Image (tube, helix red, strand yellow):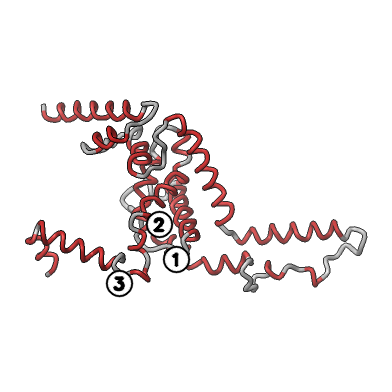
Amino acid sequence: RDEGAATSSRTHLVAEFKAALERKVVDLAELRRLACQGVPDDPAVRPVVWKQLLLGYLPMDHALWAYELEKKRSQYSAFKDELLVNPSEVTRRMEMTISKRKEHNSEGTGFLPRAEIVQDEHPLSLGKTSVWNQHFQESETVEQIDRDVKRTHPEMQFFNGGSSDALSNQESLKRILTIFAKLNPGIRYVQGMNEVLAPLYYVFKNDPDQSNSASAESDAFFCFVEVLSGFRDNFCKQLDNSVVGIRSTISKLSQLLKRHDEELWRHLEV
């Protein structure tokens, strides 16, 4: 009987959430009231509630959703094209340069003069615009991200298990964290960010709406950025000992715990 009542209550709550989300203009106060009862683990509800209520990714006006999603997803695609440097890009750029100069010198010998080789495309170049130099500088961060992503929720086949889907999901996490690190050079990547990102990506990827599921990577990226914006100072090593750093945050948490549960606080302090 209790189980049946719980199922009925959950079904009713899901219906209330769906009704709230289908309004022309979503009432944020109503959504918050419903969320206080717990956001249902429903693949058609939780992704939208997280994007809207918790992270402000979706506007309140339902009519603007498609426009805003397209804009953000296009922006993320541009980030990938610009920031995910691959050594093969060097070869492509060199071939384009050589081709253009051959066309320019078509009336000459047909050989590319030695002096015209672009130094920034040389693997040993230290130039700031060198694709190779950028690649080598970032390799350490990328390797750390790769190690952490492979350890993300090892008990879940969604992230691990060797299937093509699991490997694809890992690659998405890697791209998100790499792009974030490049856009935030003051923080870059800090161990543990993968654990913050994983639930977002998991929920968005399991959205029954195929277009949303296919864009889980871009949506998770922007929501991840929004989540970290609230406590990004905790990830900045230079601020560890400041009033906004991780040490101060832990101290405040300890004081709060002592005030409300001194027995547990004493146990943890031992």
> Hey, what amino acid is under mark 1?
Gly
> Hey, what amino acid is under mark 3?
Asn
Q: Secondary structure at mark 1?
A: loop
Binning the other alpha carbons within 10 Å of mark 1 as few (below 14), some (14 to 19) or many (20 upward) gives few
Q: Secondary structure at mark 2?
A: helix
Hey, which quadrant is residue 177 in on the image? bottom left
Hey, which quadrant is residue 130 in on the image? bottom right
Binning the other alpha carbons within 10 Å of mark 3 as few (below 14), some (14 to 19) or many (20 upward) gives few
In the image, residue 244 lies at what x, y percent? 31, 64
In the image, residue 85 lies at what x, y percent? 58, 59
Residue on which disc 3 sits: 241
Identify the residue shown where x is 37% and y is 56%: 194
Question: Does any portion of residue 233 appear in the rendered image?
Answer: yes
Residue on which disc 1 sits: 186
Q: Nearer the viewer, residue 270 or 253?
A: 253
Distance from label 3 to label 1 (Cα)? Answer: 16 Å
In the image, residue 180 lies at what x, y percent? 46, 57
Q: Are marks 3 and 2 in contact (CB under 8 Å)?
A: no
Q: Which mark is residue 159?
A: none
Q: On the rendered image, what quadrant is the N terminus found in?
A: top left
Left or right placement of residue 7 versus residue 240 in this view:
left
Q: Nearer the viewer, residue 61 or 226?
A: 61
Identify the residue shown where x is 79% and y is 68%: 116
Identify the residue shown where x is 32% and y is 25%: 19
Q: Which mark is residue 149?
A: 2
Q: Are marks 2 and 1 in contact (CB under 8 Å)?
A: no
Looking at the image, residue 158 lies above or below residue 261: above
Which label's residue is closer to the chain start, 2 or 1? 2
Distance from label 2 to label 1 (Cα)? Answer: 21 Å
Which label's residue is closer to the chain start, 3 or 2? 2
Left or right placement of residue 226 versus residue 109 in this view:
left
Looking at the image, residue 220 lies above or below residue 124: above
